[in-house]
Amino acid sequence: MACSQDLDTILMLASCCFSGIPNTLDVLSNFPFLVIGLIGLVLCYYKNYFKFRLQGELYGWTCFFIGVAAVGLGSSYYHLKPNDARLVWDRLPMTIAFTSIMAIFIIERVDEQKGTVSIIPLLLAGIISILYWRFFDDLRPYALIQFVPCIAIPLMAILLPPMYTHSAYWLWAAGFYLLAKVEEAMDKVIYEWTNHIVSGHTLKHLCAAMVPVFLTLMLAKRTMTTERKSLLMTWKVSWTKVKENGSKGESCTCTYAAVSS
């Protein structure tokens, strides 16, 4: 009971502090994007903190963190007064982040030179998809730009051998993005479950912000791998070892001694 009263008090104080902000939680929940975007951008250039080996990596991750920081600003701007004109500034930064990630993956997993060259065409494709939606009222190109990376990146992370360690962070990031999409789809349901306190859209922002958080942690922790092995191959080797250990544990040797009568 006391916990419930404390929560009500906190929510009341928060409501008083931010009562002048329309769609308060939808606006404020974009703040993590701005923070992690700026942190990542600074670390890209601070004494090569992320230890990039290629210039193309620096360009790709720079575009990604600029896109993430811009999501924090653009999405907040849109949610203050939602309309189609402002929605452009919500979606445009997301396309920059999505297309940058695709270029980064091509650099790391397919071909370094082709990946670097692909950065600008992919960014342009994202921008064109937004313009196409705005002028022709057709979301299909934008949907393609948004959802292709969601499918391609986890598959590439599993199947293609990486240059660096800690590839599993890509899957954590993909998992949080998938959770964010589920929360977005359940927006009204979650709003009802929380007694009209938090919407699924607000939780979607917070979960989606975990994507750049995990990728920043990955960049900070990873090192060049001495043996390029895909996650799938690593899992196969681990599973084989587990099966072999299980077989050894189950097998036993019995000896019999003669019993004199």
Image (tube, rainbow, N blue to C red):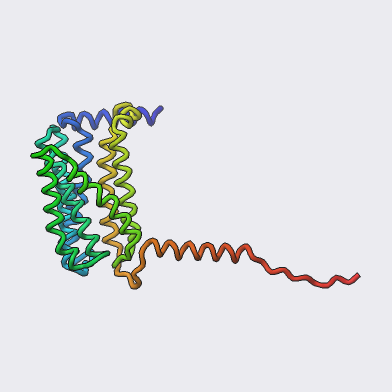
Could you say which is closer to the camera, residue 221 or residue 257? 257
- What's the residue at 67%, 66% (across, down)? 252
So how many labels did they put on this image?
0
Q: Residue at x 53, y 62 (%)?
A: 243
Q: Residue 240, relative to residue 90: is it above or below?
A: below
> In the displayed image of the protein, which residue is found farthest to the right?
261
Which is nearer the eye, 147 or 79?
Answer: 147
Image check: 176 left or right of 41?
right
Q: Quadrant of residue 157?
A: bottom left
Q: Position of residue 53 (x, y in %)?
A: 21, 69
- In the image: residue 167, left or right of residue 62: right
Q: Is residue 182 visible?
A: yes
9 w.r.t. 121: above or below:
above
Q: Where residue 77 sits: x, y (%)?
A: 13, 38
Q: Quadrant of the N terminus?
A: top left
Quadrant in which the C terminus is drawn: bottom right
Q: Please state the horizontal and vertical placement of residue 181, each as a whole percent of the image.
A: 29, 41
Residue at figure coordinates x 14%, y 54% from the top left: 123
Q: Nearer the viewer, residue 127 or 219?
A: 127
- In the displayed structure, would residue 254 be above or below residue 79? below
Whether residue 46 appears in this view of the structure is no
Residue 17 spot, x, y in % from top left:
19, 32
Vertical position of residue 76 compared to residue 58: above or below: above
